[in-house]
Amino acid sequence: MRQIPVDTSNATVMVAKAPQPKVKDRRTGEIATDKDGVTLMVVEVMFSTPDEVEILKLTVPQPGVSEDLTMGTPVALTGLVASAWENEFNGQKKHGIAFRAVAVTSLAAGASSSKAA
Protein backbone atom coordinates (compact mmCIF):
# COMPACT_ATOMS: atom_id res chain seq x y z
CA MET A 1 0.00 0.00 0.00
CA ARG A 2 1.37 3.39 -0.97
CA GLN A 3 2.01 5.85 1.83
CA ILE A 4 1.78 9.58 1.14
CA PRO A 5 3.68 11.96 3.47
CA VAL A 6 1.49 14.64 5.05
CA ASP A 7 2.94 18.15 5.40
CA THR A 8 2.31 19.44 8.91
CA SER A 9 4.41 22.62 8.65
CA ASN A 10 1.42 25.00 8.31
CA ALA A 11 -0.88 23.11 10.66
CA THR A 12 -1.85 23.58 14.27
CA VAL A 13 -2.44 20.20 15.88
CA MET A 14 -3.95 19.41 19.26
CA VAL A 15 -5.34 16.33 20.94
CA ALA A 16 -9.08 15.88 20.41
CA LYS A 17 -9.37 12.63 22.38
CA ALA A 18 -6.88 10.93 24.70
CA PRO A 19 -4.91 7.97 23.28
CA GLN A 20 -6.56 4.55 23.41
CA PRO A 21 -5.20 1.11 22.48
CA LYS A 22 -6.18 0.19 18.91
CA VAL A 23 -8.58 -2.75 18.87
CA LYS A 24 -7.83 -5.35 16.19
CA ASP A 25 -10.95 -7.45 16.73
CA ARG A 26 -13.99 -5.86 18.35
CA ARG A 27 -15.61 -9.23 19.02
CA THR A 28 -12.69 -10.52 21.10
CA GLY A 29 -11.23 -7.21 22.29
CA GLU A 30 -7.82 -8.19 20.86
CA ILE A 31 -5.43 -5.21 20.83
CA ALA A 32 -3.59 -4.44 17.58
CA THR A 33 0.20 -4.71 17.40
CA ASP A 34 2.71 -3.96 14.67
CA LYS A 35 4.96 -6.55 13.03
CA ASP A 36 7.40 -6.27 15.97
CA GLY A 37 4.71 -6.90 18.58
CA VAL A 38 4.52 -3.26 19.73
CA THR A 39 1.06 -2.15 20.88
CA LEU A 40 -0.62 0.32 18.53
CA MET A 41 -2.54 3.29 19.87
CA VAL A 42 -5.22 5.51 18.34
CA VAL A 43 -4.86 9.24 18.93
CA GLU A 44 -7.54 11.60 17.65
CA VAL A 45 -6.21 15.06 16.81
CA MET A 46 -7.66 18.31 15.55
CA PHE A 47 -5.62 19.17 12.46
CA SER A 48 -6.11 22.85 11.62
CA THR A 49 -4.74 24.66 8.58
CA PRO A 50 -5.57 28.21 7.48
CA ASP A 51 -8.25 26.75 5.15
CA GLU A 52 -9.91 23.99 7.17
CA VAL A 53 -10.12 21.96 10.37
CA GLU A 54 -10.45 18.18 10.52
CA ILE A 55 -10.42 15.51 13.20
CA LEU A 56 -7.96 12.77 12.25
CA LYS A 57 -7.62 9.34 13.87
CA LEU A 58 -3.94 8.45 13.91
CA THR A 59 -2.41 5.03 14.53
CA VAL A 60 0.83 5.41 16.49
CA PRO A 61 3.13 2.82 18.13
CA GLN A 62 2.75 3.10 21.92
CA PRO A 63 6.39 4.18 22.53
CA GLY A 64 5.79 7.16 20.18
CA VAL A 65 2.93 8.56 22.26
CA SER A 66 3.84 11.22 24.83
CA GLU A 67 2.56 10.66 28.34
CA ASP A 68 -0.30 12.80 29.66
CA LEU A 69 -1.87 13.64 26.29
CA THR A 70 -5.27 15.10 27.14
CA MET A 71 -7.86 16.97 25.12
CA GLY A 72 -6.48 20.32 23.99
CA THR A 73 -2.79 19.45 24.39
CA PRO A 74 -0.82 20.97 21.47
CA VAL A 75 1.25 18.28 19.76
CA ALA A 76 3.82 17.74 17.03
CA LEU A 77 3.37 14.84 14.62
CA THR A 78 6.45 12.96 13.44
CA GLY A 79 6.39 10.93 10.24
CA LEU A 80 2.69 11.44 9.45
CA VAL A 81 1.58 9.49 6.37
CA ALA A 82 -1.78 8.82 4.72
CA SER A 83 -2.74 5.52 3.06
CA ALA A 84 -5.87 4.73 1.08
CA TRP A 85 -7.67 1.52 2.06
CA GLU A 86 -10.56 -0.55 0.77
CA ASN A 87 -12.26 -3.56 2.33
CA GLU A 88 -15.40 -5.56 1.86
CA PHE A 89 -17.69 -5.93 4.89
CA ASN A 90 -20.79 -8.11 4.58
CA GLY A 91 -20.82 -7.75 0.80
CA GLN A 92 -20.39 -3.97 0.85
CA LYS A 93 -17.20 -2.26 -0.23
CA LYS A 94 -15.92 0.41 2.13
CA HIS A 95 -12.97 2.72 1.62
CA GLY A 96 -11.19 5.56 3.32
CA ILE A 97 -7.86 7.07 4.28
CA ALA A 98 -5.82 5.79 7.21
CA PHE A 99 -3.34 8.05 8.99
CA ARG A 100 -0.25 6.77 10.76
CA ALA A 101 2.49 8.62 12.62
CA VAL A 102 5.79 7.55 14.12
CA ALA A 103 5.19 9.80 17.13
CA VAL A 104 2.76 12.26 18.71
CA THR A 105 4.76 14.53 20.99
CA SER A 106 3.31 17.01 23.47
CA LEU A 107 4.43 20.57 22.86
CA ALA A 108 3.37 21.37 26.45
CA ALA A 109 5.90 18.87 27.92
CA GLY A 110 8.50 21.56 28.61
CA ALA A 111 5.96 23.68 30.49
CA SER A 112 4.75 20.77 32.64
CA SER A 113 8.28 19.59 33.44
CA SER A 114 9.34 23.11 34.47
CA LYS A 115 6.34 23.28 36.86
CA ALA A 116 7.57 20.09 38.54
CA ALA A 117 11.03 21.56 39.10
Image (tube, grey):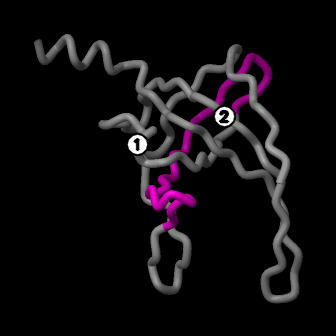
The amino acid at mark 1 is Pro
User: How many residues crowd around disc 2 within 10 Å: few (fewer than 14), some, or many (20 or more)?
Assistant: many
Res 117 → quadrant: top left
Res 93 → quadrant: bottom right
Horizontal relation, residue 49 to residue 26: left or right: right
**Magenta span of residues:** 32-53
Task: Determine the residue positioned at 69% across, 15% down.
Answer: 9
Could you tell me how many numbered marks the image carries?
A: 2
Disc 2 vs disc 1: which is toward the camera?
Answer: 1
- Give the amino acid type for the residue marked by disc 2 in the picture: Leu
Asked if labels 1 and 2 touch by Cβ distance under 8 angstroms, the answer is: no
Residue for badge 2: 80
Which residue: 51% across, 68% down? 23
Residue 41 rendering spot, x and y as whole percentages: 48, 53
Label 1 crowd bin: few (<14), some (14–19), many (20+), radius 10 Å: some
Q: Is residue 7 left or right of residue 111?
A: right
User: CA separation, marks 2 and 1?
Assistant: 15 Å
Residue 63 point in image, percent of width and height: 40, 43
Indicate the position of residue 104 as horizontal and vertical percent values.
49, 33
Residue 63: which numbered mark, if any?
A: 1
Q: Nearer the viewer, residue 72 or 2?
A: 2
